[in-house]
Amino acid sequence: MKQVAVNDWNNDGQISDDDKQIFGCKDPKWIGSLGSTMNYKGFDFSVMVYTKQGQWARSYFHEKYMKWSDRGSQHMAMDFYIPKGAPVIDHTTGDIVYATETHYGKYPYPNNSDTSAGGYFSDKGSAKGEGFQYQKTSFVKVKNICLGYTFPKQWIAKAGMQHLRLYVNVLNPFCFTNYEALIPNGVMPD
């Protein structure tokens, strides 16, 4: 990726809001969950996995922290395209140096516009460059893991109990996603 390429999608000879294209959808293509419980000699183990796949959402995290315009330093490390010879910050010394080779990053070359989109968007305001704030928020989440042991009745009867179970429950221990910010199921679609 280099600079943003803006297309005249309706072929009217000018770039306008009529050329806007919608990619992705705020609704997931599919949602699923899988639960399993296993028992063996008084021990029980259960797990619950939940997934949403195919949805996109505007990331206000990226809107706030991806901006290059905050005096030349965004608040999170972004994989920008940086051409050879472009001024960059040497993070070991804090000095401005020049890139010795081209880095082909995921995001377009920043130019201190409010959008980090460079080129065309620099004088259009953040609404035109907000496409870079939309992220695919597909995820697979382990929602619950439980390990328990039910004591035999003959052990607990002496204490006047009829049933005793000891267990450990872990909520939301893992989330697998390519989303680059906080938990993806907490992102609200626009």
Image (spheres, rainbow, N blue to C red):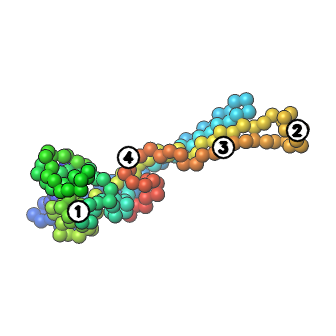
Mark seen at residue 178: 4
Q: Which mark is residue 168?
A: 3
- Between residues 11 and 82, which one lies in front from this camera angle? 82
Q: Position of residue 5 (x, y in %)?
A: 16, 55
Q: Between 154 and 143, which is closer to the camera in this rendering? A: 154
Q: Are marks 4 and 1 in contact (CB under 8 Å)?
A: no
Badge 2 crowding class, 10 Å Cα cut-off, few under 14, some 14 to 19, many 20 or more, is: few
Circles 4, 2 touching at the beta carbon (< 8 Å): no
Rounded to the nearest whole Å, what is the CA distance between mark 3 and mark 4?
29 Å
SS label for mark 3: strand
Q: Quadrant of residue 110?
A: bottom left
Identity of the amino acid at label 4?
A: Asn
Of the numbered discs 3 and 1, the one sitting upstream in the chain is 1
Label 4, secondary structure: give it.
Answer: loop
Residue 54 visible? The answer is no
Q: CA distance from mark 4 to mark 2?
A: 52 Å
Q: CA distance from mark 3 to mark 1?
A: 48 Å
Marked residue nearer the N-terminal end (3 or 4):
3
Q: Label 4 crowding class (10 Å Cα cut-off): few <14, some 14-19, many 20+?
A: few
What residue sits right under mark 2 in the picture? Answer: 157
Q: In the picture, residue 64 is in which quadrant?
A: bottom left
Mark before the other along the chain sequence, 1 or 2 = 1
| Amino acid type indicated by mark 2 | Ala
Could you tell me which secondary element the residue under label 1 belongs to? Answer: loop
Residue marked by disc 1 = 72
Asked if the residues shown at circle 3 and circle 4 are in contact, with their CB atoms under 8 angstroms apart, the answer is: no
Q: Nearer the viewer, mark 3 or mark 4?
A: 3
Taking 158 as reference, is 39 left or right? left
User: Residue at image x 19%, y 46%?
Assistant: 104
Mark 2 or mark 3, earlier in chain: 2
Instruction: Between label 4 and label 1, give the one nearer the viewer.
Output: 1
